Image (tube, rainbow, N blue to C red):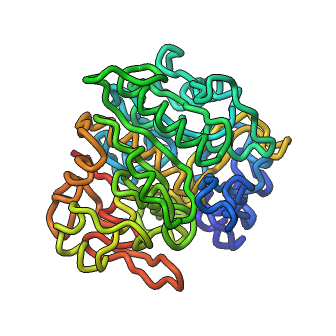
Amino acid sequence: MPAAVAAVLGLCLVCGVSGQTIGKKQILSPRTVVIPASSKSVSTDAGLRFHTNVRFLSNPSATPSEAPPYSGYAYETPASLACVYRLVSPIPGCNPNSTTVNSSGGSESIAIVDAYDDPNAAADLAYFSSQFGLPYSDSKFKVVYAGGAEPAEDSTGGWELEESLDIEYSHAVAPNAMLYLVEANSNSFTDLFAAVKVASNLIACGKATACPTGSKGKGEVSMSFSGSEFSTETSYDSIFTTPNVVYFAAAGDASGTGYPCVSPNVVCAGGTSDSRSLETGNLIAQIAWSDAGGGASEYEPIPPYQASHPQVARQLAGARGVPDLSANSNPDTGVWVWTTFPYEGEYTGWFTVGGTSVATPLLAGIVNSTGGFAASSVAELTKLYSGSESPFESSGFTDIVYGACNYYSASYSQPGWDLCTGLGSPNRLK
């Protein structure tokens, strides 16, 4: 869309997907951010059930007729993200409409853990991959039922949208890794933690059941779900300690902290926004996403990898602080997701999606694509926090130094680690 047209109409190039079509482009009306029922936190769920951290722009039924990337829109694609996070040789602006080189990384395994069944997962991943020029093979994607039988579906479609997002964007940045989608029977702690154990075994030895001692498999587990902190949460931390597995969890889409993100055995994924030019769609800067979770844990003590880092420890007063790393999560600067499971029984197709549910599989896939494969989450976090005080670019991060977060916008992005974006976003992470 020409800048003059946008200026006259008072519209925003990256504000939503509803509006009237002029030629092959779409004039955008003010957008609404939709938070699915599956992403809404309920106070009585603390310590019992988890929720997703996904949201999208409305109207999901009013998208251009052609497939993305759409001319005149600046939402993220696999290629633009590979450019932003320097998984490929970057081009100026990393524009979604002109950036075409995808990541070619990935090896070993990534396991996505979600609740309920998405019967269209494989077909949707294949279509998404075809649209964006990513490799796809049925032999490298497997759906596993954690309880041994096919789970029920989420009638609202919220968890299915989450599953489409998770598999598509871990695959987008690590397309050559073996990808598992592990489906829990429900969003209860019991079922999702059982699914995490299955996911860990799949990475360690390729089986859902317990692995032989000395299994050599390596990889990442991505958990885009979260819940409020609770007093007995430390008793669950041992779940995330399978050798050669690194665990990632979402920081949440609201101020404050949540579990399992605050576990010292988990890499906590926070949120950024990809600020882009209204005129060109080129990247201006990565900034903090104000709705992303972050803060000092109520119950988890500061782990050694943070305590040994003076600039981090000064901010935390003896508590575990999150996030650790961050990636694009703002739905206003969101990613294209393809799903054919009807949301609210009606909407299918291309969604513009955000939430720290985007950052979680992205970060899991990016770390996988670097090929480092740490011996544990703690080993990975120790490596991440071993960089220089500030700036962190030399250690493989883009330091996010603009934006605010937390209750009352009380926390600020600053040089070095902070409560909004942690160490920053990946930049040729090593």
* 307, 393: nearer the viewer: 307
Quadrant containing the N terminus is bottom right
Quick check: 7 left or right of 410? right
* 338, 27: nearer the viewer: 338
* 144, 413: nearer the viewer: 144
Q: Residue at x 85, y 42 (%)?
A: 346
Q: Residue at x 50, y 72 (%)?
A: 256
Place residue 286 in its image quadrant. bottom left
* 177, 243: nearer the viewer: 243
Residue 288 percent coordinates (x, y): 44, 69
Q: Residue at x 49, y 83 (%)?
A: 409
Quadrant containing the C terminus is top left
Q: Is residue 30 above or below residue 172?
A: below
Q: Is residue 62 above or below residue 311?
A: above
Residue 417 percent coordinates (x, y): 28, 69
Q: How many discs mark residues in the rendered view?
A: 0
Place residue 348 in its image quadrant. top right
Quick check: 283 left or right of 67? left
**Is residue 237 visible in this depiction of the protein?**
yes
Q: Is residue 252 above or below residue 426?
A: below
Residue 296 percent coordinates (x, y): 40, 73
**Is residue 276 visible in this depiction of the protein?**
no
Looking at this rendering, what residue extends furthest in the top direction? 139
Residue 34 percent coordinates (x, y): 72, 59
Quick check: 361 left or right of 398? right
Q: Is residue 405 above or below residue 128?
A: below
Q: Residue at x 33, y 26 (%)?
A: 107
